[in-house]
Amino acid sequence: MSEERSHSAMLHSIAADSVRKMIVEGGLQPGEPLPSEGSLAEQLGMGRTSIREALKLLTAEGFVEVRRGSGVYVGS
């Protein structure tokens, strides 16, 4: 894996951990919406691409679910 890809994967992982922590510490319940990608990127000081990839990781884990046209919600 190239150094650039490794760095990107690390950012995605850090972003996923940050969103996970935000959900847990924020006391969000299953079915509640998350802030928009842009808002999350601003809050976490990361690019939207890192947030988007983090949400893909969290979706694969079942931690969040993406509802097209509606947003991202805490998984059940």
Image (spheres, grey):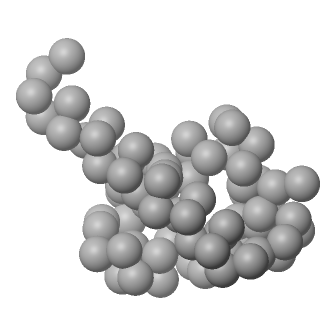
Q: Is residue 74 above or below residue 62?
A: below
Residue at 57% from the left image edge and 78% from the top image edge: 36
Where is residue 27 shown, x and y percent of the image? 74, 77
Q: Considering the image in quadrants, where does the N terminus appear?
A: top left
Q: Is residue 35 above or below residue 19?
A: below
Q: Is residue 19 above or below residue 13?
A: below
Residue at 84% from the left image edge and 72% from the top image edge: 29
The image quadrant that residue 75 belongs to is bottom right
Residue 17 appears in the rendering: yes
Q: Considering the image in quadrants, where does the C terminus appear?
A: bottom right
Residue at 65% from the left image edge and 69% from the top image edge: 23
Residue at 72% from the left image edge and 50% from the top image edge: 63
Residue 70 appears in the rendering: no
Where is residue 53 shown, x and y percent of the image? 46, 47
Q: Most extreme residue toward the top, as rendered? A: 1
Where is residue 13 shown, x and y percent of the image? 40, 44
